[in-house]
Amino acid sequence: MEAKSVILKAGDADRIVAGHPWVYQSSIRETIGTPADGDVVAVKDHRKRFIGIGFYNSKSKIAVRVLAHEPVEINETFFDARIRQALDVRKRHMPDATSFRIVNSESDYLSGLIVDKYEDVLVIQVSALGMEARKRQIVTVLERIFSPRAILERSDISARKFEGLEPTEGLLAGELTGPVNVNINGLVFETDLLKGQKTGLYLDQQINYRLVAELVARLPGATVLDCFSFVGGFALHCARAGAGHVHMLEQSADAVNAAMHNAAINRLAEKCSAETVNVFDWLSAQTKIGKHEKLIPKFDVIVLDPPSFTRNRAAVPNALRGYKEIHLRALKLLRPRGMLITFCCSHHVDAHTFKDTILSAAWDCRKILRQIATFTQGPDHPIIPMIPETEYLKGFAFELIS
């Protein structure tokens, strides 16, 4: 009996050979061996030459998620080797970090699997049927490599429905009661890993927290506005770096409470304040003036780190309008020679387009900016150039010249 495989249409193999792991249903010319959903299949070009191996799912637009370009057995030994390879990358590029992303799905050629390390607790997120079927093997490997206190699952994401999977979360191994004290650059963030955003924290900004703090340290005593502050990542780093006061804006009351609690834990509460508010509404109210009034800028540093405004390309125009709006308002509140530090986490908005949007806002309010830094996602969220989807976070720091 011939091995289970998919044969691609002429011309559709090049992208896979170049390193992209997704084989779309529309790229398949024929299927051989009647693979079941979740099975391992060989991927072959239109001349039936082997080019990879991966998980098959007829229910998904991504018909095959390629895991390797050589014929290997996908078993516990495979996951052990691949996860250790991913860990080596983090140890090499983030040697002092104790909390970081161990596996970042496509970035580590384990499509559909995310593993985050929060001190001695691991959190996994599974978004692909093939990974779901082998979850017990993955947990066994993680226990062997890390000996964690607990392994949690936070597979409560909408992407699972496209694989025919229901959301699921809970404890997979070990024991966990109460929050975990997560160390980020020497600051402690008390984190509820069962109820927090995503798998708990936004680990992709870990290095950027430090880099932004270094910029703020050049303005001792600065008044900082941290918009979309979540649990205080940028705010607390700025406060520790020498800011005179940091004001946080966040729509989630739970996040605001957590941010102020984290400020207290780190003995920074006297420098911090926070509001539970819609950031757009707050910025609009703060920049509204009467006919003969003049707006007085209040802040030396403004940080903008909003959630993604777009989940698909069709929503990009609306997203850009949103980005322009918050930058226009923020620039009006920034003092001359102050710093605007801003981020975009949407894959669908590239760095060039994002910068153009910022500069358009600056033009509209007649502000001139000097670019002083660029930011990207941390090395625990690796970027594979042949997989554009792995690059999503971009950021800039500007000084306001006038």
Image: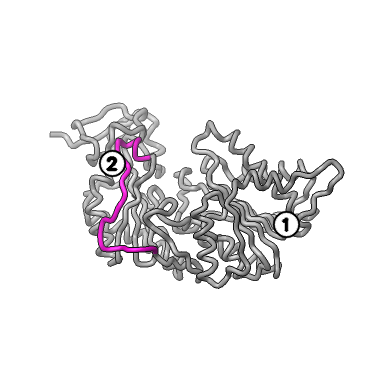
User: What residue do we see at 37% from left, 52% from top?
Assistant: 114
- For the residue carrying disc 1, how many other residues have a C-alpha within 10 Å: few (<14), some (14-19), or many (20+)? many
User: Percent position (x, y) of residue 135?
Assistant: 25, 50
User: Percent position (x, y) of residue 290?
Assistant: 81, 43
- Please tell me whether residue 127 is drawn above or below residue 191 in the rendered image: above
| In this picture, residue 258 sits left or right of residue 396 | left
User: Percent position (x, y) of residue 56?
Assistant: 27, 37
Q: Which sits in the foreground, 35 or 31? A: 35
Q: Which sits in the foreground, 42 or 39? A: 39
Question: What separation in Å lies between label 2 and label 1 (alpha carbons)?
Answer: 47 Å
Q: Amino acid at mark 2?
A: Leu
Q: Amino acid at mark 1?
A: Glu
Q: Which sits in the foreground, 101 or 151? A: 151
User: Percent position (x, y) of residue 11?
Assistant: 39, 31
Is 161 covered by the magenta stretch?
Answer: yes
Q: Is residue 395 visible?
A: no
Which region is colored magenta?
A: 159-179
Element type at mark 1: strand
Q: Is residue 318 visible?
A: yes
Residue indicated by mark 2: 129
| In this picture, residue 150 sits left or right of residue 157 | left
Circle on res. 399 = 1
Q: Earlier in the sequence, mark 2 or mark 1?
A: 2
Can you tell which quarter of the image residue 234 is in?
A: bottom right
